[in-house]
Image (cartoon, coloured by chain):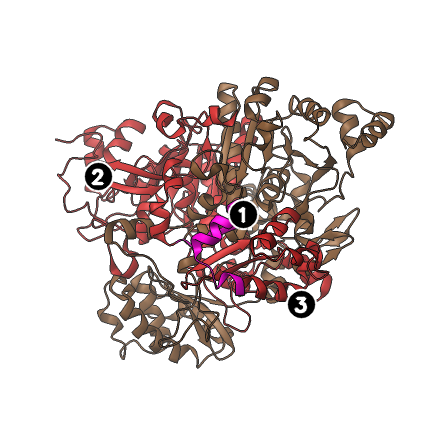
Chain colours: A red, B brown
């Protein structure tokens, strides 16, 4: 039974292997769209070497909510960069580019999220790296891909630009209100994830053929892929797709309602037994027989959906959230309070599963983080550590991966190819750092 | 002469031309397929997450057998406003791609035995039934690994296979996971001061329109399956994978967990501004709205300069954007910025940004300016059309249909969409013949017994 497979999953993680052991990834990425992908691979056990321009590194290091730094670190930077090694390497310099080639010769995957041709200008583009390593899998993620009008105009992009251009924000608002930006960098993180689908498929292809390849991904295009009914709907009906607020246009009933205490509650009950359960819970069993609501396709029609959701809204308005959740459990429909970050952090279920997990990090100290959300029974992914100061692992990477001598390393520092952090918030170690904790190669 | 000829011959093609020649989606069908050695059984039911997951593998050439109960997947009826096209729901139409559709009643003992026959020949099984259901049917991971120890058994459910909520009777839907993830709570317009929810029913926690939580679950699972395939290549062993939809989507969050635990701050709705970034917002314009991005101080300076506000706003003195992310600062600066953006059209602002990159004081640094598009405008955007996102698929059954595609482009083994969908049980004949060697008379028998 499944219980056997998952028994003590969380507790046994340390004693199991990681699925991507032996894969090395080189990252030249900033903010989220770029770094999140290698972060996912890192959680699955790949060795990720993140190259940053010293001394300030990734732009994300300065991005913090409401001006708040966590032990002098950017919060999102900490979350995004899982299990990486931190190299402060100046890729504008020929010696830096040479080091990059030496690393690429020993790597499986390269990821960048710079504008088209930037890496090529630095002599580390795909065409140059595949001469060094024909098996390399190279992914570039950016706003508009490598070719086409917007790429040619060299337009910069952000997640919010993709939310705007794709129609995602337009479809995520209430009718009559302006398009709404998700508070999430959704095109970044989803795009990064989609990129790893391609990277891992390319790895499979390489295992069969020995061939590496180049992959490009656009911030907007990845989100348009999952906008589902919207495209054929517009083609077939000739009408523009319009937003429906919290109501799901394709599932009925499915909406967010307001409880008696002004908290919010999501409910869904489209399948026959679920809908009957909801009607019974409302003490309105006759609704399940009502010709307007009798089957799912009929319920979904605009006027019927509106009528039904108004009935449910009036009922929820009289209830406490815990009452609704209890009824949902009893009658077999779906309901959930709209969780805040506090609710998620304190949720016993998430904790028991190890999704909310405590990290004991030698560099920034203990903190709580989301685990990689794919639980794998024999090779569990795992967040072990995260952010380091710019250039923190230089010695480790130079010594262990490239076998550089002390003199060579010293020379690389002297000519500014290697560098460490600037003494500013976001780039430097936390205030409590003892000057040693977390350093791998030489602490004295 | 000879030398000169050689030089011109080897003169390097420009990068955009070189790469387009190799990764334009229009030539994808001429290339090999990355996963054409993999067979996937997709038993997902009532789940866009499951269907998307198998689509992502099918786009790479995996042979995906969609296994539905004889009456079909309820998910086929999940279609906007109840609209059907040639008898099919629109969401299902977009995620039936490249799959073979068969029917099998696995709740019947004979159906389970048939499933085991398919499992013996498959690499991956995807399922979305309530935890415990597959076990009760005798086809859970523990039972199927006896049939095929190399099997990768992938489950997507609302709350996952273990933990106190795993035995909940509550089904998995996208809007529920969006609510459970925290992200909805901090997305939406702020309630105007002195107003109530009754007066402003739109100023509430707001979910995303598209099925993003289900998409997160399906895509994370595709990543998990591919990693498990890699691991199987080394060890020869299959395994069981478990995703809870709310966890998959919650993982997209970037900072609210740490913010809460360290500072005790619960993230709240901040409308079209962004509490963790400046310059980073939607701004109103003369004819709509634009996204503005300037996360590095030079980009924020360039934005001020582009609007002719370099001196007035004191841009020369700015050294970091961290200070500007403070809530009060954001509200103050947003009103100044919006006053300016309202003077221009979307197109004017986009052009100003492109020109600034060429001639501005801080060029090539320039702010990000992107027009707000409806999906109708997006679908007509010449850039996306050129990039192959909306090339109509010629489906043998449903005709010419537009679905989102070509989300990544690859030089050696790119994705492609060959057909969009198939009706319930359409491929019974082909698949049962191919995998089990059963012809029409056996199928008639199974149909009479209600098994297929």
Residue occupying the point 77% across, 26% down: B434
User: Where B394 falls versus B193 (above or below)?
Assistant: above
| Most distant residue in the front direction | A283
Q: Mark yes or no: residue A157 visible.
A: no
Residue A109 belongs to magenta span? no
Q: CA distance from mark 2 to mark 1?
A: 35 Å
Disc number for residue A303: 3
Parent chain of label 3: A
- Mark 1 neighbour class, 10 Å CA radius: few under 14, some 14 to 19, many 20 or more: many
Q: Residues under labels 3 and 1: Cα distance?
A: 27 Å
Left or right: where does residue A111 sit relative to residue B102? left
Residue A214 versus residue B284 in the image, above or below:
above
Chain at tag 1: B
The C terminus of chain B, quarter of image: top right
Classify mark 1: helix, strand or loop. helix
Mark 3 neighbour density, 10 Å: few (under 14) some (14–19) many (20 or more): few
Residue to which mark 2 is pinned: A363
The segment highlighted magenta reads A314-339
User: Which residue in the protein does label 1 denote?
Assistant: B214
Q: Are marks 3 and 2 on the same chain?
A: yes
Image coords of residue A305 (percent x, y): 64, 63
> Which element type, helix, strand or loop, lies under badge 3?
helix
Q: Is residue A185 left or right of residue A410?
A: right
Give the x, y percent position of residue A82.
Answer: 35, 40
Asked which secondary structure carries label 2, the reply is loop
- In this rendered view, identify the residue nearer to me: B42 or A56: B42
Badge 2 density bin: few <14, some 14–19, many ≥20, Cα 10 Å: many
User: Which badge, 3 or 2, is on the more N-terminal residue?
Assistant: 3
């Amino acid at each position: 039974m499944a219980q056997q497979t998952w028994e003590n999953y969380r507790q046994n993680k340390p004693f199991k292997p990681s699925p991507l052991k032996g894969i090395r990834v080189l990252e030249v990425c900033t903010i989220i769209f770029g770094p999140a992908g290698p972060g996912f691979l890192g959680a699955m056990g790949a060795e990720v070497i993140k190259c940053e321009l010293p001394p300030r590194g990734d732009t994300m290091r300065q991005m913090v909510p409401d001006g708040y730094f966590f032990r002098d670190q950017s919060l999102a930077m900490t979350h995004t960069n899982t299990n990486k090694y931190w190299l402060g390497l100046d890729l504008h310099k020929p010696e830096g580019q040479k080091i990059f080639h030496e690393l690429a010769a020993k790597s499986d995957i390269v990821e960048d999220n710079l504008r088209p041709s930037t890496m090529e200008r630095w002599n580390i583009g795909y065409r140059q790296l595949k001469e060094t390593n024909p098996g390399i899998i190279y992914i570039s993620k950016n706003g508009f891909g490598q070719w086409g009008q917007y790429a040619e105009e060299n337009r910069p992009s952000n997640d919010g630009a993709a939310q705007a251009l794709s129609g995602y924000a337009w479809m995520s608002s209430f009718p009559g209100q302006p398009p709404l930006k998700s508070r999430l960098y959704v095109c970044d993180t989803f795009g990064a994830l989609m990129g790893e689908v391609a990277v891992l498929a390319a790895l499979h292809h390489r295992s069969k053929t020995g061939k590496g390849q180049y992959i490009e991904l656009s911030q907007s295009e990845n989100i348009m892929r999952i906008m589902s009914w919207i495209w054929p709907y517009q083609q077939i009906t000739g009408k523009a797709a319009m937003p429906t607020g919290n109501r799901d246009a394709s599932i009925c009933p499915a909406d967010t309602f307001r409880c008696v205490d002004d908290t919010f509650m999501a409910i869904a009950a489209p399948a026959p037994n679920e809908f009957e359960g909801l009607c019974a819970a409302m003490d309105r069993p006759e609704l399940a027989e009502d010709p307007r609501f009798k089957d799912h396709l009929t319920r979904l029609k605009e006027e019927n959906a509106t009528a039904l959701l108004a009935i449910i809204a009036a009922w929820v308005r009289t209830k406490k959230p815990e009452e609704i959740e209890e009824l949902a459990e009893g009658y077999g429909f779906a309901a959930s309070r709209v969780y805040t970050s506090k609710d998620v952090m304190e949720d016993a279920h998430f904790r028991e599963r190890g999704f909310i997990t405590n990290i004991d990090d030698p560099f920034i100290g203990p903190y709580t983080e989301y685990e990689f959300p794919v639980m794998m029974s024999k090779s569990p992914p795992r967040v072990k550590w995260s952010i380091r100061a710019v250039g923190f692992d230089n010695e480790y990477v130079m010594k262990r991966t490239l076998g550089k001598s002390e003199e060579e390393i010293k020379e690389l520092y002297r000519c500014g190819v290697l560098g460490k952090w600037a003494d500013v918030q976001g780039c430097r170690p936390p205030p409590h750092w003892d000057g040693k904790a977390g350093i791998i190669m030489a602490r004295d | 002469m000879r030398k000169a000829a050689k030089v011109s011959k080897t003169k390097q093609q420009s990068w955009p031309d070189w790469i387009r020649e190799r990764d334009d989606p229009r030539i994808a069908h001429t290339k090999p397929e990355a996963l054409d050695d993999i067979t996937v059984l997709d038993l997902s039911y009532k789940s866009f997450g499951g269907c998307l997951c198998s689509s992502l593998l099918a786009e790479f050439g995996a042979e995906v057998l969609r296994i539905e109960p004889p009456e079909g997947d309820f998910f086929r009826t999940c279609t906007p406003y109840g609209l059907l096209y040639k008898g099919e729901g629109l969401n299902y139409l977009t995620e039936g791609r490249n799959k073979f559709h068969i029917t099998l009643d696995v709740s019947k003992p004979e159906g389970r035995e048939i499933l085991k026959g398919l499992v013996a020949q498959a690499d991956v099984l995807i399922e979305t039934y309530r935890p415990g259901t597959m076990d009760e049917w005798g086809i859970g991971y523990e039972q199927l690994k006896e049939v095929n120890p190399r099997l990768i058994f992938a489950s997507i459910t609302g709350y996952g296979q273990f933990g106190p909520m795993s035995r909940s009777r509550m089904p998995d839907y996208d809007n529920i996971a969006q609510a459970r993830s925290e992200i909805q709570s901090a997305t939406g317009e702020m309630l105007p001061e002195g107003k109530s929810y009754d007066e402003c029913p739109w100023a509430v926690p707001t979910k995303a329109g598209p099925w993003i939580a289900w998409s997160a679950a399906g895509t994370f699972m595709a990543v998990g399956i591919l990693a498990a395939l890699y691991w199987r290549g080394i060890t020869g062993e299959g395994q069981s994978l478990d995703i809870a939809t709310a966890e998959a989507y919650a993982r997209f969050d970037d900072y609210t967990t740490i913010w809460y635990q360290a500072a005790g701050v619960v993230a709240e709705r901040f409308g079209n501004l962004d509490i963790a970034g400046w310059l980073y917002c939607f701004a109103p314009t003369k004819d709509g709205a634009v996204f503005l991005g300037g996360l590095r101080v030079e980009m924020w300076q360039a934005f001020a300069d582009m609007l002719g506000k370099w001196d007035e706003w004191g841009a020369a003195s700015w050294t970091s954007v961290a200070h500007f992310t403070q809530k009060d600062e954001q509200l103050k600066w947003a009103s100044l910025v919006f006053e300016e953006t309202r003077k221009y059209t979307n197109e004017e602002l986009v052009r100003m940004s492109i020109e600034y990159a060429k001639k501005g004081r801080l060029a090539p640094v320039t702010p990000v300016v992107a027009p707000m598009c409806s999906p109708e405008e997006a679908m007509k955007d010449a850039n996306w059309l050129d990039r192959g996102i909306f090339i109509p698929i010629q489906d043998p059954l449903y005709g010419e249909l537009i679905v989102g595609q070509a989300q990544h482009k690859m030089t050696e083994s790119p994705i492609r969409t060959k057909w969009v969908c198939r009706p319930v049980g359409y491929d019974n004949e082909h698949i049962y013949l191919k995998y089990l060697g059963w012809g029409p008379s056996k199928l008639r028998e199974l149909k009479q017994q209600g098994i297929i």
